[in-house]
Amino acid sequence: MIVARDRGALSDALEPLRERGTVALVPTMGYLHDGHLSLVDIARESADSVVVSIFVNPLQFGVGEDLETYPRSEEHDLDRLRERGVEVVFTPTVPEMYPDGDPIVTVSPGRLGRRLCGAFRPGHFAGVLTVVARLFGLVRPDAAAFGQKDYQQATLIRRMVRDLEMGVEVVTGPIVREADGLAMSSRNANLTPAERESAVGLSRALEAGADALATGITDAPRVLDHVRAVLSGFDLLELQYAEVVDARSLETVDVVREGNVLALAAFCGTTRLIDNRVL
Ligand code: PAF
């Protein structure tokens, strides 16, 4: 496995891979868990070689967010990727990624980026799309893999690829959960033991929403009442939003149908967690 820390090394490492066949990229911010590794496996099914990027992208963090405390563990990440048979890991520094400073031209997520998390994290999705576009420019992958836990992010990336004719096949992987249902996330590492106990409330609330639908309740506000009732039983969760949205437009729905997405965001102490379930 080649670890490329600058664009020259990346370009050298990519050359033989391209000669051999197709390349899939798995963009990450590191502190890898089984969810990321499942994306490596999915990427492997879509291409002959797999490149993983590890870069904590300052552009997608707002003022007062957790850029400084975002968990990092490069050695551990590299070991896991080596075990998984990844061909190239790209781990640029911030100046290597943005040699001219913050980019002047960025990718605007439009109205999709103002929904759900975008309403609470202005600038976040422009930061995500801009770094993903930049990674696509540097790696020129045939395919790229993203997790469904970041449902809005995956939706926006698909849309960016389509609207800007980027020619990258976007593949997504299902949410990988801990045994008790908590969606795997690098940020879980920042939870205290008490917060960890409350964090499971998110997946329980999603289950309650799905159960309500299964019993025939299709009125979205009533489904969300069930969701909120469960969340209120977890002391350390502070709900930011709970919405049922159309899977593509991300607009809220009044009547819940199969295929809609129930999406949640909550603070658990100082850690912001998200989760969702396709109903
Ligand atoms: O999902 C993430 O880890 C990040 O948002 C991504 C896609 C790697 C862009 O920085």
Image: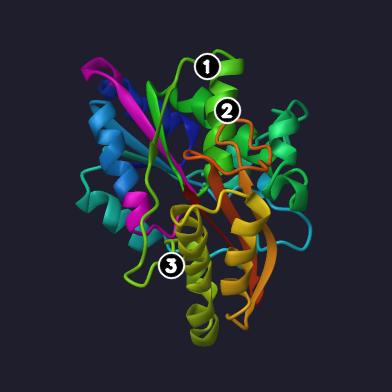
Q: Is mark 1 within 8 Å of ligand 1?
A: no
- The residues bearing labels 2 and 1 have C-alpha atoms spaced at a distance of 9 Å
Residue under the image location 78 percent in, 29 percent down: 104
**Side of 71 where 4 appears, left or right:** left
Q: Which residue is mark 1?
A: 166
Q: Which residue is mark 3?
A: 182
Query: Measured along the vertical axis of the image, is residue 204 above or below residue 14?
Result: below
Which of labels 2 and 3 is toward the front?
A: 3
Q: What span is in magenta?
A: 18-37
Query: What amino acid does circle 1 point to?
Result: Met
Q: Which residue is mark 2?
A: 133
Q: Is residue 270 visible?
A: yes
Magenta span contains residue 30 = yes
Magenta span contains residue 24 = yes
Q: Is residue 72 visible?
A: no
Query: What amino acid does circle 2 point to?
Result: Ala
Tag 2 near tag 1, CB within 8 Å? yes
Residue under the image location 47 percent in, 68 percent down: 204
x, y percent for residue 30: 45, 54
Residue under the image location 44 percent in, 61 percent down: 183
- The residues bearing labels 2 and 3 have C-alpha atoms spaced at a distance of 30 Å
**Local SS, label 2:** helix
Q: How is the image coloured?
A: rainbow
In the rendered structure, which disc, 3 or 1, sits on the residue that comes first in sequence? 1
Quarter of the image with the N terminus is top left
Query: What amino acid does circle 3 point to?
Result: Leu
Residue under the image location 57 percent in, 28 percent down: 133
**Which quadrant holds residue 64?**
bottom right
x, y percent for residue 40: 31, 43
x, y percent for residue 181: 39, 67
In the rendered structure, which disc, 2 or 1, sits on the residue that comes first in sequence? 2
